Image (cartoon, rainbow, N blue to C red):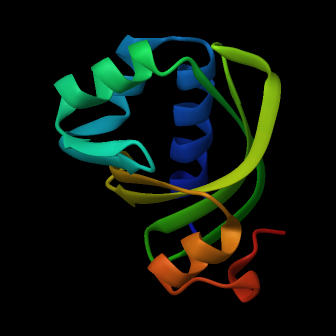
Amino acid sequence: MSTSEIATVLAWHDALNDSDIDTLLALSSDDVEVAGPEGAGQGLTALREWASESGLTLIAGRMFVHEGVVVVEEEASWASKPDEKATVATAFRVVHDQVTSIFRHTDLESAFAATDLSEADAVS
């Protein structure tokens, strides 16, 4: 387990939830990949647009990590639907303290299937 990878992902969540786009971009690689149920994009411009327009808040819960991949189970909420919350999971790839990919999944099981992580990789 890498404390650095976990710290990077937690800082990424803080920046997203605080609408601190500059910090979010600084924590991400120039060619960051962003994907989720609504579509995909690549690069800092795509990340900036997504973070600015999605109205998404992700509260980090359980975390799982193995060899640069961090899966986070999260409570998601959207500014456009203030009464609606969902439990989702996001898979992050972290290289040299920068997020290189962000793939949001509808649930933890699909994030595990996409990353080959499991409950055995839980951060205690």
Rendered residue at 18%/23% (across/down): 45
Q: Is residue 113 above or below residue 74?
A: below
Where residue 22 sits, quadrant-wise, is top left
Whole-percent x, y for residue 6 in the image = 60, 53
The residue lying toward the viewer, choosing from 109 and 63, is: 109
Whole-percent x, y for residue 78 in the image = 65, 23
The residue lying toward the viewer, choosing from 64 and 104, is: 104
Whole-percent x, y for residue 11 in the image = 57, 33
- Dividing the image into 4 quarters, which one contains the C terminus? bottom right
Where residue 50 sits, quadrant-wise, is top left
Where residue 23 sits, quadrant-wise, is top left
Rendered residue at 47%/78% (across/down): 115
Whole-percent x, y for residue 25 in the image = 32, 25
- Dividing the image into 4 quarters, which one contains the N terminus? bottom right
Rendered residue at 60%/33% (across/down): 13
The residue lying toward the viewer, choosing from 24 and 4, is: 24
Rendered residue at 35%/49% (across/down): 35
Left or right: 32 as drawn, with respect to 30: right
Left or right: 23 as drawn, with respect to 8: left
Q: Is residue 95 above or below residue 110?
A: above
Left or right: 76 as drawn, with respect to 62: left
